[in-house]
Structures are given as C-alpha cells and as structure tokens.
Image: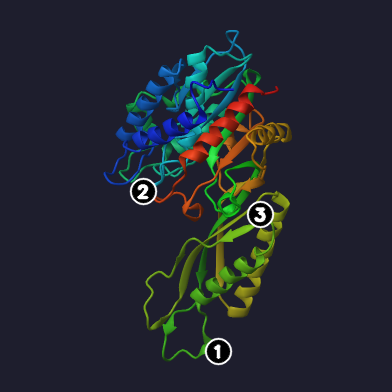
Amino acid sequence: MLSKMYSYADCGAQIMARADVLAQHTEVPGMLTRTYLTPAHHAAAAQLAEWMCAAGMHVRRDMAGNVIGRYEGANANAAALLTGSHFDTVRNGGKYDGNLGILLPLACIHQWHAEGKRFPFAIEVIAFAEEEGVRFKATLLGSRAAAGNFDMSVLDNQDEHGLSMREVMSACGFHPAGLAKAAYDAASVLAFVEVHIEQGPVLLNENLALGVVTAISGASRYMVEVEGLAGHAGTSPMSMRHDAAMAAAELGLYIEQRCQGVPSLVGTVGIFNVPNGAANVVPGKAVFSIDIRAEEDAVRLQAVADVLAEIDMIAARRQVLFQTRKTHEANSVPCAPRLQQQLAAAIRHCHLPVRHLPSGAGHDAMAMAAITEVAMLFVRCGNGGISHHPDEIMSTEDAALAAQAFACFVENFQK
C-alpha cells in the first residue's frame, strides 16, 4: 500500500485540487464546457500529459486525441492493466464526471513512482478524448478508437459551425486514416477498470462512499411523431378530437407506469414538443423521445415491446398516427465477476461495506468491453446525485477512500 509518508488524504486532496485546475480549461468563461478538439480541449490534454510525465509515465497521444500515460511494469513490454475515463464534458457540466477516473489513478501512480514501486504488469491511464457526443453527435469516440471499433461514418458528422469531424481532426493533426493504429491489441491488455462518480443517488441515500458496478445498462431510444388533427379549442367536441399531444402524453404515462417497480428498469420521455402549438388550438402534431434502459437486456426488450404495443392501441383508440424511429440501441455490458470480486475485496480492505449496483449511464467501459474484461468502481456524489450540471459535487474524503480502494485493487490484482 502507499507509504505512510504519503497518505490517502494527500491523494484525495490532489485529486480535488487537480479537478479544479482542469475545470479552468473551458470554452465558456464561468461554466465548464469542453468539447472535442476545441482549444480548451487541447489545453486540458496538455495539462494531463504534464501530470502523467510528472508521475513517471511515458506519454503519447493517439490519432483519436486520447492522451495515454504508461507506467511501465517490472519487465519492459509487459501486458497492461488499463484504466481511465474521458476528459470532454457536456455543456455547462460538472468537474468530476469522467475527470475523476483519470486523476485518481494518476494520484496513485505519482506515489508508486516516488517509491520506485513497479508491478508485474504495466498500468496505462487513458484520458479518452471524447465520450459525451456533444460536438459531433457521436459518443464514445475515444474508447471506440482504442477498442478498434470506431465507426468511420461519423467522420462526416458536422458541428454547429458546419465543420465536419474529419476536417477538424485533420486540422489538428489527427488524420482519420491513422485511427486503426489507435486500437489496442487484445493480447496486450489484462483488463480495464474505470473509476467514476455514480451520477445518481443510490450510494448517497445509503450513506456509502463506494460501490461495485455489476453491469452497464443497455438502452433503447426512439424519436416519435404523432399526427392527429388540429382544431379550434372552443368548437371541437371532446369526443371528436384527434389530439396528438394527449395521445403522446398517454403513452408517456404508460411508460412511467410500465417501468415502475422493476429493478434497474427506467423509462424516460426527455423531449416533448408540440410544434406550432397555441393555447386555443387542439394539437395536430406532437414530437417526443423515448429512452428505456435496464441492466438485463431481456427486461429492457420486453418493456420496449410492451410500449410499442401500447402505441398501436392508443393510435387505434384515439385515431391518430404514430411514427417511431429508433435512434439508439445498445446491449447491456456486464462487468467481469472476477474483477467485481477483486474490487469488493479492496473495498472491504478499507473497512467499508460492499454495495453492488448497475450503472444506468453509459461509460467508456462499454466500448472497452469489446477487447477485454471490464470493471467499474463507483464513487458517491452529493447534491442528490446530480451530475452533468455545475452543482455536481463529491468530497475529498470520498476521493481518498476511492484512491485507497483503487490502490488495493491494483496492488493485489490477479490476472
């Protein structure tokens, strides 16, 4: 474990201080917005590379813009335990989402380097350049490149200024033709473990600092348009209306009811619009989104099937037309049982209770699962579990506990 000269409290303090420094690299003064390959993004990458070098790591940047620090093992060219997370943000986001999973292993490696401690394996910290999908509406770009399954078709996606991803990458010296070289050889990788704030209230409500993730939930998303018949609000009898908004609202309430009380199953209508709506007009059109997630794919897919069946019944009863378009489909990614067990043992070594829980949010570990076994350590966040928001918080004490658990996991890692 870390020496007495350098306590885990020191680790926690370093993590929190560096999160503050990293937050200064933003596109918008007064709020944290750092999207893919902007000047703020490059500045953050340079800062991370500097910290990696200071921790005794060999640093490189691949063609996706990922910043990778390698802490060599006792033998050169040893297989590597991979860790890390993303350093891009949503617009007006929080300081710890993604960043924690980079800064925490760096704090541990900094001390291992100071002590001259090496392991039978190398450790690589990957600061993934893009996960959120904000600028080019494509997610997990950094980890998909590292996993060797980057979707080249998204290179034609454009940002709000009409610049394609291909153009922006090339202008920055990241040539898309070289993306294949960013992929790891699966034989050189032992596992991938990601440390992340929970982004939810479970650990907070149970007064627990840490949790072991069992799986990253699968997700099904749709955009739906409902076509009804517009009419005058005063002269259209209730029994003769074809109200698109009420048909959409009825389905939204069904989704809420259908997903209630089923472990890990959640359903959300996050977008709900009535185009050209007016107070005195029966809505003739409604547009909304559906997002259904669950730890187990069978549970999610059954809920989706029930929702689609309900659409048909509502359409027939209300005499409206639903048009559904699937926008996203991702299967659940289970975390490796053996890695879960090792994380649980590390948490117990810290004299803390072990809580297993699924992740409802997507993470870079989802992409990395294509080449290796994955695990995730969740860290409690405050303010009701709020994330993707400037009010996202965590404590120095929890950062220290997470560093202690991570260090124990690495120091006792079994291949």
Q: How many marks?
A: 3
Q: Residue at x 61, y 37 (%)?
A: 376
For disc 2, the marked residue is 92
Of residues 202 and 389, the one nearer the viewer is 202
Image location (x, y in percent) of residue 136: 41, 42
> Callout 3, which amino acid?
Ser
Query: Residue flagged by tag 1: what amino acid is it?
Result: Ser
Horizontally, residue 43 falls left or right of residue 67, namely left
Q: Nearer the viewer, residue 88 or 328?
A: 88
Quadrant housing the N terminus: top right
Q: Amino acid at mark 2?
A: Asn
- Residue 299 position in % (x across, y down): 71, 55
The C terminus, quarter of image? top right
For label 1, the residue is 239
Residue most toward the top?
75
Task: Please provide percent x and percent y for residue 93.
Answer: 40, 47
Compute the Cα span from label 2 to label 1.
46 Å
Q: Marks 2 and 1: CB-CB under 8 Å?
A: no
Marking on residue 264: 3
| Within-10-Å neighbours for mark 1: few <14, some 14–19, many 20+ | few
Q: Secondary structure at mark 1?
A: helix
Q: Is residue 304 visible?
A: yes
